[in-house]
Image (tube, rainbow, N blue to C red):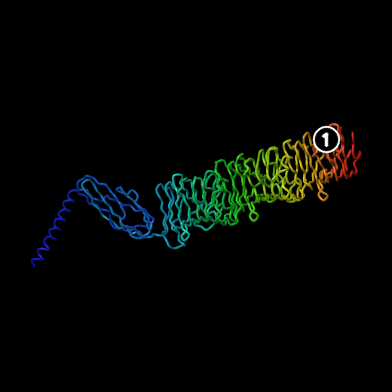
Amino acid sequence: MKRVSIFIFPIIFIFTITFTSCEDESALHGLTAVAGVDREVAVGQSVELNSGASIDVTGEGFNTNWSFVSRPDGSSASINNANSDIATFVPDMTGDYLVRLTISNNLGESSDEVTLTAISTGTQEIGGNYSEELHLIKLTEDPDIPDYIVTSNVSMTARLKIDPGVTIHVTSDALIRIRGNGFIEANGTAAEPILITGTSNMAGFWRGIWSESSDFDNVLNHVHISGAGSNNMATGAPRAGLHVSGNQLNINHCTFSNINGYGISVTSTDVRIPLQNCSFSENDQGAMHITAAQMRFIDSETDFNNHEIAITGTTLNDDINHVWPAAKNGNYVFTSTISVFDNVTIEAGAVLLFDNDVHLRFRGVSGKYQALGTEDNPIIFKGSVEQPGSWRGTTIESSNLENRFEHVHYYHAGHTNLLTGFGKAAVGFSSGARGTFSNIHFDEIDGYGVYIRHANTSITFEELSFGQNLSHGAIRMLAEQIADLDTQSNFANNHVVVNGGQISDEEDVEWPALLNGSYLFTNTTTVWGKVSIQPGAILEFDNDVTMRVRTNGVLVANGTASDNIIFTRKSGSMDHWKGLAIETSSLENSMDYVEISYAGNSNLITGVGQTNLALGNNARLTLTNSTISNSLGYGIWLRPGAELTLSNNMFTNNAEGDVNEP
């Protein structure tokens, strides 16, 4: 017994001391925290925490702190104004939230706890202006019952946070608007997408979502927007499910459907809308209405489901490298003229349609412009109305040697002249333009396939092809560009129209024979350098047009027995051309297996009358195995000192004779 008594006494003593110590401490600080009574609260509704019932006997005042002791598993609820007498939080899940209130001053502190049990209350109504965060959480598990009904326009100047699986129904013509100083964070998942639709399941019932925010955290992730488009959201903006006028909105794995208008609209060039793996369906105007500046944000996985993407006119001049991807199951439709100064790459398979008289103009003098199709996935430029002359065409004004168009098909261009001084064509190259055009096809053009106006333009052409429906011809160029042509391009009996020009005395060029095509010279062409013409080439000349080889120039036109080189009048015309004048004494001048016919329309050069071929003073030429025929004057006219070496030639039907010698 004694042992027991001795053991118990210290314990009693210790507890007595401890108790007395607490009594003394409480008496010193005079604080008693009162967190409130335990109670039930509603999920998704703001809960007020009030320290007003706490006791301060000394009157010293105290500091306040609210904190969670525990929350339901998975909850991310947070306490707003946690160091204020009145704080709030929004329970985001059903279950118990144990909250601790701690009050303190220089003398000590006191704590109390309250249990708040969050329960689901079913559908809630929202609407009006929100200057504090609005957090929309899942309220019901019934898929037929919405978590929220938007009863009037929602205007956010704070964060709108929407949890996975939330369903929002919007009443007639109501709008969800994210203002400039607000932002939206709608993060659904593949398993629990967010659904925003009308209270009536019909297209155009509610207005849509308008994001004016430039916050980089703006995101729509796994969100399905449907039934919108009751009215325009902004001046100048079309009806749409989503209109973006702020600088940034990330759009991932979203669906836009059953909209009376477009799925997405953007009217400003400085808006960024990175798009990833989205889908568009049953939107009566199209998938998107954007500027050309947003094309670079379209990804290859977004499915447009045979919707069109309307591209409004703009100027791209922001020192940005633009990539225009192929739209999966979709086409771009350019509704007005685009001027591009930035670099642009168009990816294989892209289909670009153009409205009435729309002009795509690549204007940057040093810009790099590439349209890189493949044989299996060509890039297509055509009119939104599929008839010749429905849109204007494309001009390239860059001298960048990396300019390259390959495996591109052009249709329906030629509505009006491309630029001042140009004619109608699918593609025009401006002064100083450079680059390579390979495997390009032209058809149904009201004008030319290609138009080159300036002598300093140099484009390498490789394996072009032309249909039968080019009203003016395959290519319009100057003599300076003839050497840029290749022998693999198929001209399908179209002319390459040569509007005069000259070969300078420093040049040594070769003019190829055109596959299924011929040259048509419409103005005088002067050769000061050396021109060699390939066997089989056909050179036709318009009424009264001449070709002159002058001073130090050289002409080598050597055909073969099976591939004569032909100089003659325009096919189908009854008008004669003026003729060919050789005014150079070079011993290299040579013509073999050549046919020269239907010239002599007027006097050829000074001192020479009507003739197919003239040699000027002291000129030299070797002419063999050739035919000179059907001149309105002589077959050949020789000036004093001219040296003509003839062998095995034929002269027929020359009105004034075969050779006129001085």
Callout 1 crowding tier (Cα within 10 Å): few <14, some 14–19, many ≥20: many
**Residue located at (72% from left, 43% from top):** 483
Question: Taking the image as drawn, is residue 375 in sight?
Answer: yes
Q: Amino acid at mark 1?
A: Ala
Q: Position of residue 450 (x, y in %)?
A: 70, 44
Q: Residue furthest front?
A: 587
Residue 127 appears left or right of 606: left
Residue 137 appears left or right of 251: left
Question: Taking the image as drawn, is residue 285 in sight?
Answer: no
Q: Nearer the viewer, residue 290 or 276?
A: 276
Q: Nearer the viewer, residue 412 or 210?
A: 412
Q: Nearer the viewer, residue 360 or 181?
A: 360
Quadrant hosting residue 504? top right
Q: Residue furthest left?
A: 2
What residue is disc 1 on? 619
**Residue located at (45% from left, 53% from top):** 186
The image shows residue 193, relative to residue 425, as above or below, that is below
Q: Residue furthest bottom?
A: 1
Residue 552 appears left or right of 297: right
Residue 460 appears left or right of 90: right
Q: Quadrant of the C terminus?
A: top right
Q: Position of residue 99 (x, y in %)?
A: 30, 55
The image shows residue 324, relative to residue 662, as above or below, that is below
SS for dot 1: loop
Q: Position of residue 515 (x, y in %)?
A: 75, 50
Q: Position of residue 54 (x, y in %)?
A: 24, 50
**Tally of numbered discs:** 1
Q: Quadrant of the N terminus?
A: bottom left
